[in-house]
Image (tube, grey):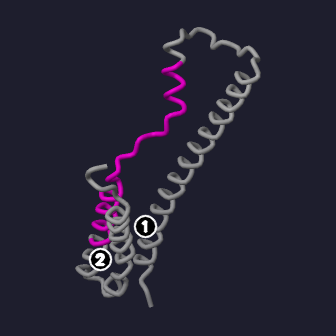
């Protein structure tokens, strides 16, 4: 029913998106683990300070460098609050491009799977809605 070329094209696109998703999940989990580890170190140090236990000094850092290093470790990364707009536009345009490419294809089976691009379009629209429903008012 379907041409092998179309099946392999869809398989390839799925493979690319799956690899990207796995990389994003790995990056998130590594960052989360690092933050949890640093939070544990911070809690241990704070309990030691409360009990009056002397803390080992960092080897070759002065007090200002220690505070700078502490702030780098314990400050969460600042995300641009408009990130859903950029990601949503990218995904929606990718889905729309896929739909157009399948509809304009000369292969008859390609026109049958154009609706797969709707996944990307609706995912992008969902990110747009997420941004507009969760953004902070201008005055705050």
Q: Disc 1 and disc 2: Cα gap in Å?
A: 13 Å
Up-down relation of residue 104 to residue 21 (above or below): below
Q: What are the residue bounds of the magenta stretch?
A: 67-96
- Answer with mark 1 or mark 2, whichever residue precedes in sequence: 1
Q: What SS does tag 1 mark?
A: helix
Horizontal placement of 37 versus 124: left or right?
right
**Residue with the most extreme bottom position:** 1
Among the 4 quarters of the image, the one containing residue 87: bottom left
On the image, the x and y values in percent for residue 6 come to 40, 77
Up-down relation of residue 11 to residue 82 (above or below): below
Disc 1 designates what residue? 13
| Residue for point 30% across, 59% down | 85
Q: Is residue 11 magenta?
A: no
Q: Residues within 10 Å of mark 2 (few under 14, many from 20)?
A: many
- Classified by dominant secondary structure, the portion drawn in magenta counts as helix
Disc ID at residue 99: 2
On the image, the x and y values in percent for residue 112 come to 35, 87
Q: Nearer the viewer, residue 126 or 43?
A: 43
Q: Nearer the viewer, residue 135 or 109?
A: 135
On the image, the x and y values in percent for residue 79 come to 39, 45
Among the 4 quarters of the image, the one containing residue 22: bottom right
Q: Is residue 75 magenta?
A: yes
């Amino acid at each position: 029913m379907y041409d092998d070329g179309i099946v392999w094209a869809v398989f390839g696109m799925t493979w690319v998106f799956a690899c990207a998703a796995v990389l994003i999940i790995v990056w998130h989990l590594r960052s989360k683990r690092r933050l949890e580890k640093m939070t544990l170190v911070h809690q241990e140090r704070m309990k030691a300070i409360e009990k009056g236990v002397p803390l080992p000094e960092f080897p070759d850092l002065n007090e200002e460098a220690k505070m700078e290093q502490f702030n780098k470790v314990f400050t969460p990364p600042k995300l641009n609050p408009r990130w859903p707009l950029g990601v949503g536009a990218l995904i929606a345009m990718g889905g729309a491009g896929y739909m157009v490419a399948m509809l304009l294809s000369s292969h008859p089976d390609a026109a049958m799977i154009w609706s797969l691009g709707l996944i990307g379009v609706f995912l992008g629209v969902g990110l747009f809605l997420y941004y507009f429903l969760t953004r902070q008012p201008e005055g705050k």
